[in-house]
Amino acid sequence: MRRKPHKLQFLETLATRKKLNPEQQALLQKLQRGVIGEENMDLLVESILGAEVDCLDDITLEYQGSVVQIDKLLIIGSIIYLIDMKFYRGHYIFKNGEWYLGEKILANNNFEQLRRAVRIIQNVLHDHQIPLKVQGVLAFMNPESSLTVEDNLKETVLNFTDISTWLLQLKQNTTNKQLQDWKSAIRNYEIAPYRTKEIFPLEKMDTLQKGICCPNCHQFNMNENRHTVSCPCGYTEAKEIAFTRTMCECGVIFHNQNLTRPQLKAFLGKDLNPRYLDYLLEKHFEHLGRPKARLGYHNKGILFDYWFAAKKDYFEQLARRTTWKNANISM
Ligand SMILES: [Zn+2]
């Protein structure tokens, strides 16, 4: 599963409960465009190369003290394509080793970042005696942007409109030979994804909208029933999911803190039954310190879907029961 960058999880969650400042708002939109770009790439790859194509998406690695985040690795024949996606706006030129936007020279050379990632993957493969070659690919995912390259580069550069053609060409090179387990070799170096450095201070809890936010219409008018919560917009959710999801949202906003009962009580707002909170903390969260939960609960600082990826089946079953019950009521 491709995860939203942590900064995006943080800003999106914060935005449901507070007005973002213009800088945060602009960054939120930029990160959202990034996610759409990645999804577009995944769709193109899958529709052209087929669902069985061998990829590794969105992985953060630490190799000999260097940390690198990789958007996509794709293997075709004996080449691993390391794809770095950019969502820039505007028309760029790469000449004499520099990036230009109009007359302006950019401070960062994106090819250096890509080369570093390529070197790391190449070394990992070498360490594991896997004879695959790594090829760097820089893909511009915004259809309205472009990069023109005037220098000779060993990297592949793709503007958005080139991607389909490039994938179709790759498809002809596909070989069926059994390859070594390149993914587990790389996964040996996997670390947790970057966390945003931006924090929201606990003292500012008062400035946040409290309660359960409807995932459908983003209002805070959820009505609590025995086993469900329902929104005037028509959205109904299992109560256990709604509350647990909201507790994760609190974790995302205050990602630098442990989760504590008082903090969660304040976040969930006046309608919360404290006994229900204790029940959920006991059931789904890991307490820290002794006596029990003295230091609060472990905060993964990520959204519900990622936090409880391992309990996906359990929560899906709960969600199904909710629809089944509603179906009966409306009969
Ligand atoms: Zn709603």
Image (cartoon, rainbow, N blue to C red):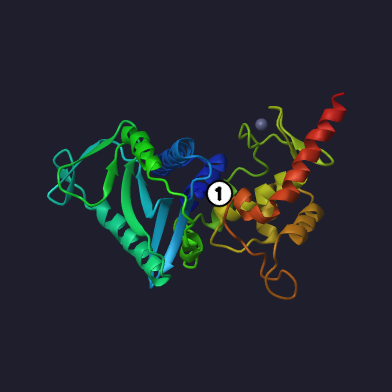
The three-letter code of the residue at mark 1 reads Met
Closer-to-camera residue (276/125): 125
| Element marked by disc 1 | loop
Closer-to-camera residue (206/218): 218
User: How many callouts does the rendering have?
Assistant: 1
Closer-to-camera residue (239/194): 194
Percent position of residue 291, x then y: 75, 75
Residue 327 seen in the current view:
yes
Image quadrant of residue 229?
top right
Query: Residue at 39% of width from left, 61% of height from top?
Result: 68
Relative placement, left or right, of 97 versus 113 is left
Q: Is residue 259 above or below residue 174?
A: below
Relative placement, left or right, of 310 versus 317 is left
| Ligand 1 position by quadrant | top right
Residue underneath mark 1: 1
Percent position of residue 259, x then y: 64, 61
Query: Residue at 29% of width from left, 34% of height from top?
Result: 145
Q: Is residue 8 above or below residue 183?
A: above
Query: Residue at 20% of width from left, 50% of height from top?
Result: 153
Image quadrant of residue 148?
top left
Query: Residue at 72% of width from left, 49% of height from top?
Result: 313
Percent position of residue 327, x then y: 82, 29
Closer-to-camera residue (117/106): 117
Q: Is residue 68 above or below residue 272?
A: below
Picture quarter with the C terminus? top right
Relative placement, left or right, of 32 versus 309 is left
Percent position of residue 104, x then y: 16, 43
Residue 194 seen in the current view:
no
Is the residue marked by circle 1 packed among few (<14), some (14-19), or many (20+) residues within 10 Å? few
Q: Residue furthest top?
A: 331
Is the C-beta of the residue carrying label 1 under 8 Å from the nearest atom of ligand 1? no
